[in-house]
Amino acid sequence: MSITFADPTILSHDELEEGTAFAPRFDAQGLVTAVTTEAGSGRVLMVAHMNAQSLALTLETGEVHYWSRSRAKIWKKGESSGEIQKLIEMHTDCDQDVLLLTVEQTGRGAACHTGRKSCFYRIVKVDDGAVKLLDSGEPRLFDPKAVYGL
Amino acid sequence: MSITFADPTILSHDELEEGTAFAPRFDAQGLVTAVTTEAGSGRVLMVAHMNAQSLALTLETGEVHYWSRSRAKIWKKGESSGEIQKLIEMHTDCDQDVLLLTVEQTGRGAACHTGRKSCFYRIVKVDDGAVKLLDSGEPRLFDPKAVYGL
């Protein structure tokens, strides 16, 4: 990989928050949080993680790569499902430990492994002191059993 | 605090992902990731963390409380700056380790401690193999030196 990042530990607070050096603050596991939104609508599709290699691959190829914590490997989004994410834009936050991705969600338009567009298909509702989840009615765009054999 | 949450470790995979029990999967530090968006625009304002107490306080009071990792304490958003966040809606994701908050950002409308509306005010740009940050021109809505004495 040819893209490299600045070292956040040698930057001043002001350089980190106001400067032009891209210095992702990977955590103890070597990961940053990635929030992925849909181009056009701005809707939040999913939240995942990236290590340095998946971040570099994303910037180099224009296709989004995450780090799968459960499988402990690079995860090119859509490699199994066909739901590739094309990177349109990337932002970093003030202290450079979160990335905000704007993507075109290809395939059937489902970012979530359940077959829905977004992973955020349930609303947290408080009713008379009790908390429950309410399905927001987000449709499935594919059948996960057919796609993943789950 | 009166609001309590279900235990995710006793739920089946299907109950966790498709059920009505709200069972936040707090990590080893007792935290879930919270992505906060602006009501109306849907714009991502910030990303922070919540523990069980801050999550319960948020649902009970309708005002957003996070857990400050740097200060290791409950952090009512706006307690110093006046930039209170009123909770409009909350979603959870498929595996219940991320919360998506829709808020009305009160005060001067700045979620970021730098005085900007959003923490995502810099774009990651790749130019001829080198990566740099580009200021998106997001205006400051308050002067952080005046508000925090930084």
Image (cartoon, coloured by chain):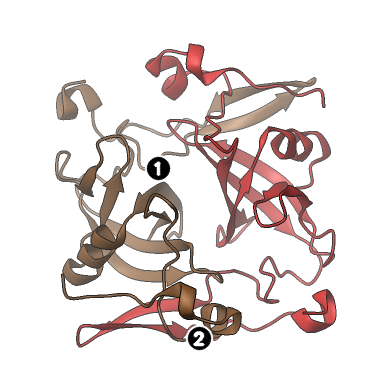
Chain colours: A red, B brown
The residue to which callout 2 is attached is: B19
Q: Which percent across, then down, holds residue A140?
A: 68, 82
> Which quadrant is the N terminus of chain B positioned in?
bottom left
> Is there one chain holding both mark 2 and mark 1?
yes
Q: Amino acid at mark 2?
A: Gly
Q: Which percent across, then down, holds residue A76?
A: 79, 51
Mark 1 belongs to which subunit?
Answer: B
The residue to which callout 1 is attached is: B118
Residue A27 is tagged as none
Mark 2 belongs to which subunit?
Answer: B
- For image coordinates 72% across by 27% down, the residue present is B126
Q: For residue A142, say whether it is visible.
A: no
- For image coordinates 66% across by 69% down, the residue present is A112
Q: Is residue B110 left or right of residue A113?
A: left
Give the camera-side residue of A70 and A20.
A70
Q: Which percent across, then down, holds residue B12?
A: 56, 82
